[in-house]
Image (spheres, grey):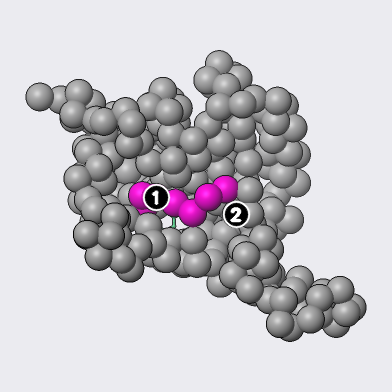
Amino acid sequence: MLYKEQINPQKIPAHIAIIMDGNGRWAKEKGKERSYGHQAGAETVHTIVETAARANVQFLTLYTFSTENWKRPEKEVTGLMSLLLNSIEEDLFMKNNIRFRTIGAMQLLPQNVQDRLNDCIEHTSVNTGMCLTLALSYSSSWELTEATKQIAQLVKEEKITTNQIDEQLIAAHLATNYMPNPDLLIRTGGEYRLSNYLLWQCAYTELYFCDTYWPDFKEEEFYKAIVDYQLRERRFGKTSEQL
Ligand code: IPE
Ligand code: IPE
Ligand code: MG
């Protein structure tokens, strides 16, 4: 039976975050350049965005380019930026009622990429369906540092006292303040780490790792992850009996 048919539509994770990994190795195994893998990865993004929207996922947050990825060879970084520029599919978002957002140090991206992203954010802001967020030039260390600076400034200006700093206030100063915490985090590509992604937000997220390289991660793989998630018991520190 297909995984798609095993899904309980009442228990769709509201927020799915994905670490899209394995493009380079996928290409290398085919004797191609890494850029070929990134290109194929962009096609998977299209498929998964549409699949998630149709499955009624409310928030989809994709790790697209990390703070640490700036350290890659210049040629790869430039290639990724132009791929990004050409892969922002406003038509797809409009057709599927998707709101588009980004998190990360956007000012570090090339100006033409920033402009394109901002146009898309603005044009899709009227949509009411799934919220798609790309994490770009993003890392949790960056995000938590920024939040700390903002909160310190509030204390300095005597707008708040240190006693008023609580979990809610910190969450409100994170780049992700418009979304709930992820219910499910998927990492493709066989590595078992979070690579500086949504560390605060994933405090109680269900983690799903698979060996499939991102370019091969298609509909059924996505549904398989959701089925796996739906079989789990989320206790949030309580006992089974209390749920
Ligand atoms: C993920 O694939 C895409 C980005 C990080 C931009 P990789 O490029 O990390 O692929 P591998 O891990 O080297 O196979
Ligand atoms: C994480 O993948 C970042 C993205 C998917 C954008 P990496 O391939 O950069 O992660 P590490 O360095 O192997 O942990
Ligand atoms: Mg990688």
Residue 146: quarter of image: bottom right
Looking at the image, which residue is at 53% across and 50% down?
180
**Amino acid type indicated by mark 2:** Thr
Q: Nearer the viewer, residue 101 or 232?
A: 232
Looking at the image, which residue is at 43% across and 61% down?
202
- The 10 Å Cα crowd at callout 1, few under 14, some 14 to 19, many 20 or more, is many
Q: Earlier in the sequence, mark 1 or mark 2?
A: 2
Residue 145: quarter of image: bottom right
- The 10 Å Cα crowd at callout 2, few under 14, some 14 to 19, many 20 or more, is some
**On screen, 196 above or below 135?**
below
Q: Disc 1 vs disc 2: which is toward the camera?
A: 1
Residue bearing mark 2: 176
- Point out the stretch of residues depicted in magenta: 179-185
Asked whether residue 185 appears in the rendered view, the answer is yes
Q: Nearer the viewer, residue 79 or 69?
A: 69
Asked whether residue 142 appears in the rendered view, the answer is no
**Amino acid type indicated by mark 1:** Asp
x, y (%) of residue 50? Answer: 43, 25
**On screen, 130 above or below 147?**
above
Q: Which mark is residue 102?
A: none
x, y (%) of residue 185? Answer: 36, 52
Split into 4 quadrants, where in the image is the C terminus?
bottom left
Which structural element holds mark 2? loop
Residue bearing mark 1: 183
Q: Is residue 45 left or right of residue 153?
A: left
x, y (%) of residue 108? Answer: 69, 58
Split into 4 quadrants, where in the image is the N terminus?
top left
Looking at the image, which residue is at 49% across and 35% down?
58
- Residue farthest to the front? 242
**On screen, 72 above or below 151?**
above
**On screen, 86 above or below 179?**
above
